[in-house]
Image: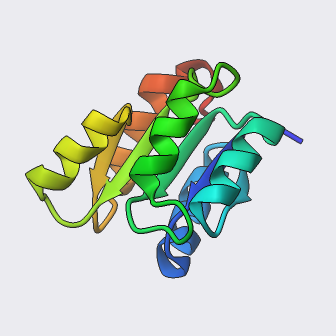
Amino acid sequence: MGKKILLAVAKALALDLEKMVRQWGFDILKAHDGQEVFELAQEERPVLIILERNLPVLDGMSVTVLLKDHPDTKSIPIVAICEGRCAQDQEKARDAGCDAYLSRPVNSGELKSIITKFLSSEVAT
């Protein structure tokens, strides 16, 4: 199995993101709630995590804080998906420790730019 990106987003968005990142040479891990994000990140060590704020069990910002505090996962880049261009969501994502954020609807070019920024040597062209 190749380099993995962990997705924890709504089903419809997950399908779009999955298509995008697979074409760039990544495998996909999916989590349905924040607790699963935390557990999968420790077990699988994805190269990047993309998550939404509104996750069941542990919300996206809480799990980000836990991941950034854990020695095994603190270096994994985390990208938050924010609703619209809401500055408040982006500020909360930054405060929690997210490394980047994207607004919905997710633009393929913006996503590739962020992935390239963190994983430049691993993105297929």
Report if residue 3 is visible in the image: no
Q: Please tell me which residue is depicted at 45% across the width and 49% down the height of the picture.
A: 62
Relative to the observer, which residue lies in front, 101 or 41?
41
Vertically, is 22 above or below 14? above
Q: Quadrant of the C terminus?
A: top right
Q: Quick check: 81 above or below 69?
A: below
85 relative to 74 in the view: left or right: left
Residue plotted at (65% across, 45% down): 5
- The quarter holding residue 24 reads top right
In the image, is residue 85 above or below residue 40? below
Identity of the residue furthest to the bottom in this view: 12
Residue 81 image point, x, y percent:
35, 56
Q: Residue at x 81, y 40 (%)?
A: 44
Residue 79 x %, y %: 42, 43
State the image quarter where residue 31 is shown: bottom right
Q: In screen coordinates, is 21 left or right of 117?
A: right
Is 71 left or right of 16, judged from the image as shown? Answer: right
Q: Quadrant of the N terminus?
A: top right
Q: What residue is at 65 percent from the left and 57 percent from the top?
A: 35
Q: Is residue 83 above or below residue 75?
A: below
Q: Is residue 30 visible?
A: yes
Q: Nearer the viewer, residue 42 or 26?
A: 42
